Image: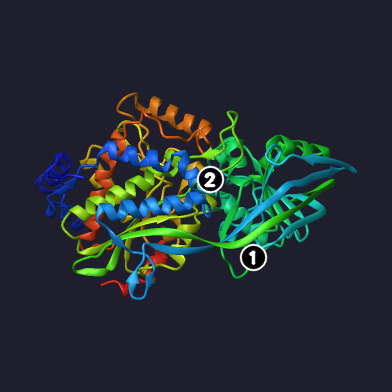
């Protein structure tokens, strides 16, 4: 990679910082002018790396598969070639290239037997068609549920601070709960859960956790495309293959024995058989007055064996040590994994290549590492964290954040990259979700100087804030965000951008069709990486400690460690 002196971005930043008619810049933004180095990110190099990572040879980059072995080896090779030092686990006083991540691995053996019994008549269910059941993550070697009562529990939310309780004292022990996806506010856009913007209560992970806390035998989430933000194909592909979780002391406190999704039509039919109307109950569930409803003469049964074991996957970690403050760390993160080999699509393709998701982020991480390695050494350390098992629930980043290699109290920020747009340039950019922080303010200023306007997450109802690897850092107080490529394209505007997004979500996301395309220019991605480089560089060469907004739910956790920062 070439390092260009005084590129257009650098000139724009210097002009913005030095213009007397503008308000005084923050110290962090002004620090950008100290560095004359601005990298030029080569679109052809990014394309080549994505093509390699998304090739069939890498078998979809599934954790604990030969695909992981190839991926980890490739990323280490690229990081070495880029000029990074190993930043992983300490062994005999030296840093390794990886951080081992122990994971519980679970896979259903054979075809699971699943059925609802309604009015004395059994209705067999086909895995992946009407229902998508996950392999259990509580360590069970088998699942045997016989005629468990079924309860509709609205959105499955218990939020005392919002005076909301969908359970109303219902004893769920030994029962199967059926709940709706997203928040009670999703359809109306107003209420106690952020309107259209999804809260954590709307995420499927929360709903499983709440069911486990209440001792339910299982939880089934009703799939609807709009509130889920993806179609049934994504649900099927993500939930019927091998499952992983971090190794927990008490996994049953987080996971009920049975976790899964059902199609909306099946839920409508079940409720109708009990004399209930799905749409009417949904409207009731959007109010505080909703009470859980037992489905009359309806039970659920499941029987299957489980191949369950503990395996070790790997986070890959490169690092540049700071010259003045090596104990203070700026992190760039991205996940290397995808879904591996799974059920075939209509064309018979079984390899889930994950080109956009997230070979793009991994290539970006490598090239940002190359940029820093060729620039003057930063004052603070910079870590390039390529995590495992994001597709299984943000597990690699969760493990790092719970067992950090470098203290979180002196981690300046996490800048995450997930599913970047490999096409042409956009006129804007966004973040995943709508959290506010000084880190985001700095990113906005830098992006604007580079010709990119900030647009609030155009789809906050999708809950993207809880679906990327920055979340494990954020909930522990570390300022963090995920960069989202813009949707207002230079060539075609918003109409073209939204059309492309819809096509990706419908036809490629978590499907074998997410493959490298020779038509991808990587022009927009290479431009955006210049902004992300500047953001990390200013943080690594300043005394700034960005914080969350005063009303952020993550502010208290950050403030609690203020004494550890100078």
| Quadrant of the drawing holding the N terminus | top left
Q: Residues within 10 Å of mark 2 (few under 14, many from 20)?
A: many
Q: Is residue 456 visible?
A: no
Measuring from the top left, give residue 92's x and y in whole percent.
36, 76
Q: Which mark is residue 340?
A: 2
Measuring from the top left, give residue 214's x and y in whole percent.
69, 62
Q: Is residue 263 visible?
A: yes
Query: Which residue is rendered at x = 76% and y = 50% of the image?
Result: 151
Q: Residues within 10 Å of mark 1 (few under 14, many from 20)?
A: some
In the displayed structure image, the side of residue 425 where residue 264 appears, left or right: right
Measuring from the top left, give residue 473's x and y in whole percent.
42, 60
Q: Secondary structure at mark 2?
A: strand
In the picture shown, does residue 276 fall above or below 369? Answer: above
Q: In this orientation, which residue lies closer to the viewer: 432 or 384? A: 384
Give the Cα distance between marks 1 and 2: 28 Å
Q: In this orientation, which residue lies closer to the viewer: 462 or 523? A: 523
Query: Which residue is rendered at x = 32% and y = 74% of the image?
Result: 564
Q: Which residue was labeled with disc 1?
A: 253
């Amino acid at each position: 990679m070439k390092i260009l002196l005084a590129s257009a971005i650098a000139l724009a930043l210097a002009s913005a910082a030095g213009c007397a008619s503008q308000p005084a810049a923050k110290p962090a933004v002004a620090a950008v002018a100290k560095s004359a180095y601005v990298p030029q990110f080569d679109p052809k190099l990014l394309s080549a790396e994505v093509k390699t990572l998304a090739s069939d040879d890498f078998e979809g980059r599934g954790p604990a598969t030969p695909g992981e072995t190839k991926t980890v080896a490739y990323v280490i090779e690229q990081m070495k070639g880029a000029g990074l030092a190993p930043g992983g686990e300490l062994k005999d006083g030296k840093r390794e290239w990886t951080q081992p991540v122990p994971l519980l691995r679970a896979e259903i053996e054979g075809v699971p037997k699943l059925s609802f019994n309604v009015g004395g008549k059994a209705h067999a269910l086909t895995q992946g068609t009407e229902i998508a059941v996950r392999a259990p993550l509580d360590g069970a070697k088998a699942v045997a549920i016989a005629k468990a009562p079924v309860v509709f529990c609205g959105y499955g939310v218990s939020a005392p601070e919002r005076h909301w309780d969908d359970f109303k004292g219902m004893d769920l022990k030994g029962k199967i709960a059926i709940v709706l996806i997203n928040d009670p506010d999703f359809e109306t856009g107003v209420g106690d859960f952020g309107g259209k913007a999804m809260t954590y209560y709307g995420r499927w992970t929360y709903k499983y956790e709440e069911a486990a806390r209440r001792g339910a035998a299982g939880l089934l989430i009703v799939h609807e495309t709009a509130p889920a933000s993806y179609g049934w194909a994504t649900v099927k592909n993500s939930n019927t293959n091998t499952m992983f979780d971090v190794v927990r002391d008490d996994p049953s406190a987080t996971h009920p024995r049975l976790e899964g999704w059902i199609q909306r039509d099946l839920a409508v039919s079940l409720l109708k058989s009990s004399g209930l109307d799905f749409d009417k109950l949904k409207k009731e569930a959007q109010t505080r007055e909703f009470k859980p409803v037992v489905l009359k003469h309806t039970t659920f049964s499941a029987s299957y064996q489980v191949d369950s074991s503990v395996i070790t996957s790997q986070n890959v970690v490169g690092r540049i040590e700071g010259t003045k403050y090596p104990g203070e760390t700026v992190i760039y993160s991205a996940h290397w994994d995808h879904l591996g080999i799974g059920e075939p699509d209509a064309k018979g393709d079984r390899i889930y290549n994950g080109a956009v998701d997230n070979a793009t982020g991994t290539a970006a991480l490598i090239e940002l590492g190359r940029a820093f390695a060729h620039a003057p050494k930063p004052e603070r350390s910079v870590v390039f964290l390529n995590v495992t098992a994001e597709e299984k629930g943000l597990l690699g980043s969760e493990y790092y954040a719970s067992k950090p290699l470098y203290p979180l109290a002196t981690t300046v920020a996490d800048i995450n990259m997930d599913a970047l747009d490999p096409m042409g340039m956009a006129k804007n950019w966004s973040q995943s979700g709508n959290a506010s922080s000084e880190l985001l303010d700095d990113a906005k200023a830098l992006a604007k100087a580079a010709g990119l306007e900030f647009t609030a997450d155009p789809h906050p109802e999708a809950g993207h804030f809880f679906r990327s690897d920055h979340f494990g850092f954020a909930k522990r107080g570390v300022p963090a965000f995920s960069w989202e490529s813009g949707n207002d394209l230079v060539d075609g505007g918003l109409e073209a951008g939204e059309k492309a997004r819809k096509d990706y979500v419908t036809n490629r996301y978590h499907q074998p069709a997410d493959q490298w395309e020779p038509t991808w220019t990587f022009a927009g991605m290479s431009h955006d990486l210049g902004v992300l480089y500047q953001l990390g560089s200013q943080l690594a060469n300043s005394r700034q400690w960005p914080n969350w907004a005063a009303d952020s739910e993550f502010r208290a956790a950050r403030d609690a460690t203020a004494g550890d920062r100078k």
